[in-house]
Image: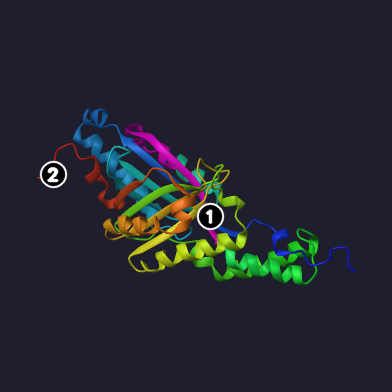
Amino acid sequence: MDHNQAEAPAIEQLPAVPLTLEGSSVLHQMFRFRRAAWRTLDDTERAGILAEASAFLSVLEQREDGQSACYSMLGHKGDLLVLHFRGSFEELRDAELALAALRLSDYLETAHSYLSVVELGLYESSLKTYATLADRGLTPFSEDWNAGVEETLAIQRKAMAPRLWPGIPPAKYLCFYPMDRRRGEAMNWYQLPMAERQRQMREHGMIGRRYHGAVRQIISGSMGLDDWEWGVDLFAEDPVTFKKLIYEMRFDKVSAIYALFGPFYIGIRTPAAELGSLFAVEPPR
């Protein structure tokens, strides 16, 4: 028998970690507007600063290899959210530095930020792949095992490319929140068998499918990158849809027992050409 082969391990001996695919690098930047300082400028100076920022952000909106978009935030958590999708962390850094170089940045104060990578979890494919490789007598994490896993991932990357490298949906409203899976003493998601996690995630996903066409969801992984385990972006034309979807999901087991949610950030899409509407010094008439 080949040194990479052995008796097929029992299901409980197979790897517990599901395979994942990673795509776009994602950065959320939340800012507060220093309105008092902005008011001290004259109309000409304000117009020049806004023209520079609008021209810069208009280019980023139309990039084909990773976009940016601006949102007017509601509530006390900030005034402006800038969302960036890029091909790498280096490109995110370039976008962050370029935004900081704008004169407008002198009047923006960072309230929060979140770094993550678009992620697709492959629970079902993982179970099938691990079982198939085990049936071939391959030892988990051996050279031949790893080659078999990579073959599966390569096929999935090609099939899932549009979801791994998405454009920013043009919907009017954005809801962003980070989340974890519970790992306390009584309830620990990571101690469940993979088949049970896969079953619960399938049930969870069925709720989301009922909102197809009303909400676009993009999940990004942030383990080791930021304070939570995942970031969730929801895009919709009606913000009440966020409430209905998230409320309904609270009743499924994976959310009711194992989910922990961070703060929610809500924004209204603001095209770069309309950026001035967010920084007006006079109330609208």
Q: Is residue 207 above or below residue 285?
A: below
Q: Position of residue 93 (x, y in %)?
A: 51, 43
- Taking the image as shown, residue 164 lies to the left or right of residue 68, namely right
> According to the image, label 1 marks what residue?
87
Identified at 48% across, 59% down, the residue is 65
Q: Nearer the viewer, residue 163 or 75?
A: 75
- Taking the image as shown, residue 55 lies to the left or right of residue 189, namely left
Q: Earlier in the sequence, mark 2 or mark 1?
A: 1
Q: Is residue 159 above or below residue 117?
A: below
Q: Amino acid at mark 2?
A: Pro
Q: Residues within 10 Å of mark 2 (few under 14, many from 20)?
A: few
Q: Position of residue 159 (x, y in %)?
A: 56, 71
Q: Quarter of the image containing the N terminus?
A: bottom right
Q: Quarter of the image containing the C terminus?
A: top left
The magenta span reads: 98-121
> According to the image, label 2 marks what residue?
284
In this rendering, the count of numbered labels is 2
Q: Amino acid at mark 1?
A: Gly
Q: Residues within 10 Å of mark 1 (few under 14, many from 20)?
A: some
Q: Secondary structure at mark 1?
A: loop
User: Could one spot residue 277 in this view of the protein?
Assistant: yes
